[in-house]
Image (cartoon, grey):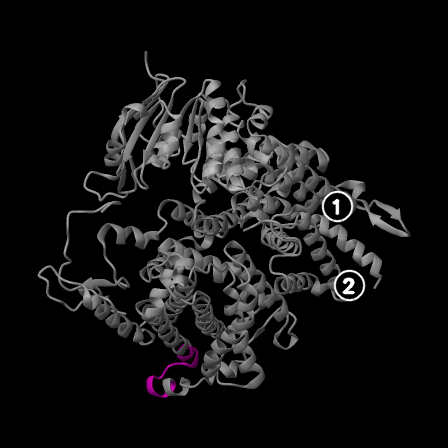
Amino acid sequence: MANLLQIAGLKAFYRDFQALFGVDLYLDAGETVAVIGANGAGKSTLMRSVAGVLSNQPEMVVYKGEPIGALSAPDVMARGIALVPEGRKLFASMTVEENLLIGTYGRKVDGPWTLRGVYELFPILQERRHNPSTALSGGQQQMVAIGRALMSNPQVLLCDELSLGLAPVVIKDIYAAFPRIRATGAAIIIVEQDIGQALAVSDRVYCMMEGRITLTGRPGELDRAQIHAAYFGADQHELG
Amino acid sequence: MNWVDTILQGVLLGGLYALFAAGLSLVFGIMRLVNLAHGDLIVFAAFLILVLVSTLGVNPFLAAAIAAPLMFAIGWLVQFILLNRTLGKDILPPLLVTFGLSIVIQNGLMEGFSADSRRVSAGALETASIPLAGLNIGLMPLLTFASAILVILVLNRLIYSTSIGRAFRATSDDPVTAGLMGIRPERIFAMATGIAMVVVTIAALYLGTRANFDPSAGPSRLIYAFEAVIIGGLGSLWGTLAGGIILGVAQTFGAAINPEWQILAGHIAFLLVLVCKPRGLFPRAID
Amino acid sequence: MTSGFETMMAEDGSQTPWRTEIGTRLSTGFAGVALLVLAGLAFAPFVVSRGVLQDLFFILTMLALAQSWNLLAGYAGLISVGQQLFVGCGAYALFGLVTLLGMDPILAVLLAGVVAALLAVPTAFFVFRLHGPYFAIGSWVIAEVGRLVLAQWKMLGGGTGTSLPREAARDMAGIALLKDWFGMKAALAADALTFWLALIMVAVTIGFVYRLLKSKQGLGLAAVRDNETAARALGVDARRMKVTVYLATAFLTGIVGALIYLQKGRISPDAAFSLTDWTAYVLFIVVIGGIGTIEGPIVGVILFFFLQNALASYGSWYLLLLGALAIATMLFAPRGLWGLVSERTGIELFPVRRVLKGRPLAQTAKGGPNG
């Protein structure tokens, strides 16, 4: 059976600088896949390439059999791939509820994720629904960002660095919502620097370094030394 | 000088200036673009209304209603094909391209219509007046002011209570992330300019029926629109109305002292606000 | 300016003095040619007809205005559509000094520049409160204020304007000299004097702009234009720099404005503060020629002159064409005609980039984010 999302030989450039050197990755329906790696490894570039923010060759990203690598972000999200961008990127001039509502602009599909569904997932947001999005704490903003992406009832949810800048207890709260999201059938790719959290929620893991996949496998099958080497590079010093 | 009458005339004049400014304010709010051809587009619309009135024989209000969708399309196309290409971090291209556009429109109109002064006839309405509190208030100025209020109400409703309005605000905040929501910024910008051109058509209706206009009248309208926006403060349409009113009142006071001082009085009011409150009287936007 | 460079090591481990160079062989060669051209032009009043002389005068004054505007907009990033304020004020200062105070016109031209610069001080106070496109329109508004105020000055003709008294022009310093030595008629002599002044102004303006760009301040200016925040973080006083450029261009523009109207002999507020003549044309010259370069306005003014001659009888079509050309240039060739040439060939006649010369740097194979 073909994969839901197939990334093959993905190369990405920022002007003259090459960020991805032929990345291969696949995602099946209902799976949660984690992509880990240090800063600058290319994880966000990978997410943005899939989401259409960066344009690539069409066949480098294939979704449900269709080559979408060259499509723009609006076209990609209309097909059911939603990105929770790095840094949340909420719309500053809008309230919490308006931020959630805008998530349906390009794709109006029936599904479990309505305003009500999102408020049930993250009850604190219902309390704050009319607050300006900038008035929320980092963790709450992350919830809005996730909810906003969910509102389009995507089949693939891309989460870029959810834990960035958040306290550990807040990160736990956010990831505690994941089982509910998985239960509705969405396939998820999470990009994380928090290795522990990534391994805990995912079915499979990819590790990246300097624009390449250096390791892949199931969390249970990989040992610490392997991950360390793949994350930091074999010739780096022990970082404890 | 009859104080009350002067102030009242000024307030009503402010309605016209607010109409000039509303389109400018909208476009700047969404895409940080100041269209230096804005005033010339008002004059262009006035000529369009004139042509419709004379060829179709309809009254100016109906002509404006016919002109509005045409102006919407023109604005949409100009933005999509031409002005979208100038948007970016550099402020030079939009300024120079819209300046060039201003010159092109002015001279195009000059070639098409000659430099003669024109006026759109509104028939009996032009001199009609309503007695109110002991004064005779012109019907057209009153309609102008009422239209300004209506336009601002509708625009605010559009921006703050509709889905497309949310799309406007999202695009203004962050065009890239807006794309992730399925919003296409190029089309949003084109729509914004299209809507601004509809407002411009309404402004042109009242400009054309109120006073003489000719192909070179554009730059002055741009300056009044600009002054109203700056006095009122960026980002708030009601602020723009307030700015228009202050400008109108300053001008009518100046005119009451000496007719040659009308425009200068407006400039001085503008400069005073610029010195004392550089962000305007009711600023809202974070620039 | 070279701190830190002394400690960089060359490949063989020795310490080599580094230096920055700005001139190139081509530019030095060009400088020689330019001097020859200048000298040649200086002889023009003796060889060409009065009509040609007036044409040359027009080209020179437009070039001087264009170089000033280019410095303001292209280098300092201050896009003004209100420089006609200084043209008009310089011109009216001249008329005021000559008509009301009986001053010699040549001296008055210089003082007109000073008047314009003095006026630029309060003007800057207002206009620097605005940014970007609002700065542009604000400068326009202030120019309009200038026009309206001067239209009220009845002693200088009010709204309809006035002419220079004939004696004032005929008795300028130097006219007697020209009449005696070369047998010139007074009218031609007056034109010759204004022509030489225009030539001097072009040389001074270009020289000033070039010196400034080659200096440390010029480097700071370029930094401010590219990224003001970063430049300020490095200690560049952005505000001071911009105000200085604004005042300097006001001075230069004021002198040229006075010169233009000295030659015309007649002034009116609408003409002296005309947006079309002193901003639209100048802007088109700079943009189509090549903004942000010294060569650009030179190319632009030559093209402009030929276009104007060819299309003079077509009135509005001429301006329409100019506007369309400016739009097309901005969209498809944003660096103008000179930019197209310069990009293809790499020629720079007035180079301002600093090139590091010395020994080759030690290079290793590594690069990229992790080493």
Residue A80, given in percent of the width and then of the height, sits at: 45, 22
Question: C310 or C245: which is nearer to us?
Answer: C245
Q: Which mark is residue B145?
A: 1
Q: Is residue C203 left or right of residue B283?
A: left
Q: How many marks?
A: 2
Residue bounds of the magenta highlight:
C179-190
Quadrant housing residue A14: top left
Residue sitting at x 80%, y 42% = B125
Query: Does the magenta stretch mainly form a helix, a strand or a loop?
Result: helix
Identity of the residue furthest to the front in this view: A240
- Per the image, the residue denoted by label 2 is B256
Q: Is residue B7 above or below residue C168?
A: above
Indicate yes or no whether the magenta region holds residue C274: no
Q: Are marks 1 and 2 in contact (CB under 8 Å)?
A: no
Q: Is label 1 in a helix, a strand or a loop? A: helix
Front disc: 1 or 2: 1
Question: C26 or B122: which is nearer to us?
Answer: C26
Q: Is residue B73 left or right of residue C352?
A: right
Q: Is residue C192 left or right of residue C108?
A: left
Q: Is residue B74 visible?
A: no
Q: Is residue A175 above or below residue C331?
A: above
Indicate yes or no whether the magenta region holds residue C188: yes
Q: Is residue B222 above or below residue C40?
A: above
Q: Chain of mark 1?
A: B
Q: Is label 2 in a helix, a strand or a loop? A: helix
Residue C260, given in percent of the width and then of the height, sits at: 46, 71
Q: What's under tag 1, amino acid-wise?
A: Phe
Q: Residues within 10 Å of mark 1 (few under 14, many from 20)?
A: many
